[in-house]
Amino acid sequence: MRARDLDETGITNLGPVPEGMSFLHATMAMRGKRKFILNPEHHSKRLTICETLREIHRESEKPEPDMVAIRELVMSAGDMAKRMDARMKELKGMIP
């Protein structure tokens, strides 16, 4: 397997944070490279990463955001992301 196959840049991530740049600023700099946009007004009513991220956005827009709720939602989204990553690796392992 080539190093590029393990890297996944452009597929599951947008690459490393440049030296001397904060994570937030690197994220903002990559805004134009995003493929998808989440609509925070959409409600799927399913426990998915996207719906969790929409809920974080909705909570953060409140005049007094509930930081305990936001932290819980972040950790839940992280768990779902790790589950997806593990599943992707499992599926890639099935490819001859």
Image (tube, grey):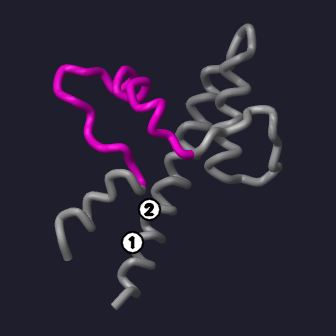
Question: Which residue in the structure is indicated by mark 1?
Answer: 89
Q: Residue at x 38, y 86 (%)?
A: 95
**Residue 26 shown in magenta:** yes
Q: Indicate the position of residue 64 as horizontal and vertical percent values.
A: 71, 10
Q: Which residues fall within the magenta stretch? A: 12-35
Q: Residue at x 34, y 27 (%)?
A: 26
Q: Indicate the position of residue 57 as horizontal and vertical percent values.
A: 66, 28
Mark 2: which amino acid? Asp
Q: Indicate the position of residue 53 as horizontal and vertical percent values.
A: 63, 38
SS state under label 1: helix
Which circle marks residue 61 in the picture? none
Task: Pick the residue in front: 59 or 37.
Answer: 37
Task: Pick the residue in front: 20 or 10.
Answer: 10
**Residue 21 shown in magenta:** yes
Question: Which residue in the structure is indicated by mark 2?
Answer: 85
* Image side of residue 44 versus residue 47, left or right: right
Q: Indicate the position of residue 79 as horizontal and vertical percent values.
A: 51, 52
Q: Residue at x 20, y 76 (%)?
A: 1
Q: Residue furthest bottom?
A: 96
Query: Badge 1, how many Cα within 10 Å: few under 14, some, many 20+?
Result: few
Q: How many marks?
A: 2
